[in-house]
Amino acid sequence: MQDNPRPEKVAVVQEVKGKLEASDAAILTEYRGLTVKDLATLRRSLRDAGGEYKIYKNTLVRFAVREAGLEELEELLLGPTAIAFVSGDAVTVAKALRDFARTNPHLVVKGGLLGGSILSAKDTTALADIPPRDVLLARFAGGLAAPLQKFAGLLQALPRNFAYGLKALIDTMPAEEAPAAAEAPAEAPAAEAPAAEEAPAAEEVAAPEAEAPAPAEEAAAPTESEATESEETEGEG
């Protein structure tokens, strides 16, 4: 830019630089041969798709891309250039440009900018073939929902199938196994056999009660002197 550029030129450069930095994408086109009516129709279709179509002089755009650090875009600034600034889904704007070019071959897509990546003309054409963001999100959500629905069905079927399988297992068991299973708990008391070992303790407790009268018998027995006196008395009689 000149040492003392006019303020209006500086304003345009800053405008282009600001739009390039703020937009989600920018698609550069050549509009040579399009009428004023054609351009108006194109602007409306791009506005509906979330884009803004602006025409600038290449010299001013070159200054803007240099200041924005996007020098790779300079090679696209040949011939009359208009930029479609995208706010939102770049795929929708690319489709609008492609559809318009089908009936208006004078419109030529040169390339563009998507995030921080430079797009060639071929890349921009491929971008138009990608399904819109809403469609991709719907497909992604559907892809997630299908396994979840299948898993929920398996969870619901698990208790039912388990009950059916358990009943089928019981039905296939031989009839002889049922009584054996019923008698199994009766053998459990055998484990209580050690209780019989406690019987001696009861006998030991009872023994002192049987021997208790022994002192009384000893007290009732006559002494030797008493026996002698008794015999003498009987002799005198």
Image: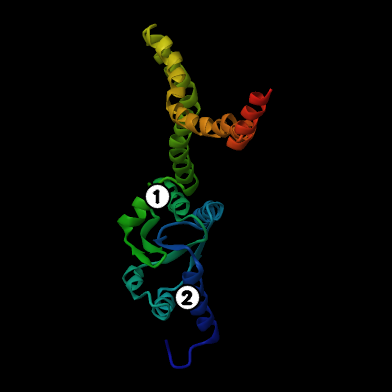
Residue drawn 54% across the image and 82% down it: 8
Give above or below for 183 relative to 124.
above
Image quarter of residue 221: top right
Q: In the drawing, does residue 236 fall left or right of residue 78?
A: right
Give above or below for 42 relative to 67.
above
Q: Which mark is residue 128?
A: 1
Quadrant, the C terminus: top right
* Residue denoted by label 2: 17
Element under disc 2: helix
| Residue 28 position in % (x across, y down) | 40, 63
Element under disc 1: helix
| Kind of residue at disc 1 | Ala
**Farthest residue in the top direction?**
175
| Kind of residue at disc 2 | Lys
Q: Nearer the viewer, residue 54 or 73?
A: 73
Quadrant, the N terminus: bottom left
Does label 1 or label 2 sit earlier along the sequence? 2
Q: In the drawing, does residue 76 fall left or right of residue 135?
A: left
| Residue 224 position in % (x across, y down) | 58, 35
Number of residues whose C-alpha sits closer than 10 Å to that of mark 1, classed few (under 14), some (14–19) or many (20 or more):
some
Give above or below for 33 relative to 212.
below
Q: How many marks?
A: 2
Residue drawn 32% across the image and 72% down it: 72
Number of residues whose C-alpha sits closer than 10 Å to that of mark 2, classed few (under 14), some (14–19) or many (20 or more):
many
| Residue 50 position in % (x across, y down) | 54, 56
Q: Which mark is residue 108?
A: none
| Residue 210 position in % (x across, y down) | 57, 29
Q: Nearer the viewer, residue 209 or 47?
A: 209
**Farthest residue in the right direction?**
237
